Image (tube, helix red, strand yellow):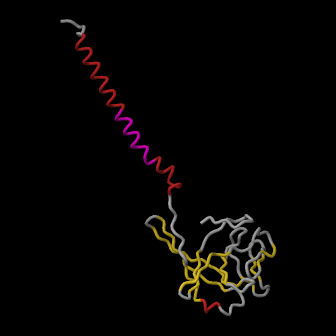
Amino acid sequence: MTLNPSPSSLSADESRRSFLGALVAIGGIFVGALLSVPLIRFAIFPLLRRTTELKSSPVGELKEFSSLTEPTLRTIQIEQVDGWRKAVSEKAVYVTKDSQGQLRVLTSICPHLGCTVPWNKEKNQFVCPCHGATFSLDGTRVSGPSLRGMDALETSVQDGQLLVRFQYFRQLVSDKEVIG
């Protein structure tokens, strides 16, 4: 009985081992690539994500605002779709007229720190209760810590209805910048 393997059986064992080693390596690469797909998708999702379309919300009929002398507070419903979840929220807006008599819809959110800004009839201005910023009838900044006037929203008219697209704007900056 000889303990030394023959040269022909040695090469067959080596080729079998190298084949199994290569098979395990290829399998490991395949499984690693398969497991990395969710991680890569998670990393690049914000770049590929498509946001939902901003839909216009009805504010009221145009004839309701024909004799407008001071801002009118209206509540609109915003529909937001996140995947399969649909959320409906209510937002307050002011309908007013600018210096040329054109209808403007202003968000009630203060551009300084996001407080809700009410219309003050006695002062004939919008006055922020948080930090005292004041805005004129058309939303122009009068005084206070706010760096800009109240934010006007995009409006349109369809079938006699005033429609508005509600958006959120960055606070504490002098330029109107949409964030959502």
Q: Residue at x 28, y 21 (%)?
A: 15
* Residue range corresponding to the magenta coloring: 26-38
Q: Position of residue 47 (x, y in %)?
A: 53, 54
Position of 30 relative to 149 (above/below): above
Nearest the eye: 127 or 147: 147
Q: Is residue 37 left or right of residue 73?
A: left
Position of 88 relative to 15 (above/below): below
Residue reaching furthest to the top = 2
Magenta-highlighted stretch: main secondary structure? helix
Q: Is residue 68 one of those drawn in magenta?
A: no
Q: Position of residue 142 (x, y in %)?
A: 80, 76
Q: Position of residue 86 (x, y in %)?
A: 47, 70
Q: Is residue 57 left or right of residue 7?
A: right
Residue 62 position by quadrant: bottom right
Nearest the eye: 140 or 32: 140
Residue reaching furthest to the left = 1
Residue reaching furthest to the right = 143
Q: Position of residue 24 (x, y in %)?
A: 33, 31
Q: Is residue 37 one of those drawn in magenta?
A: yes
Residue 136 position by quadrant: bottom right
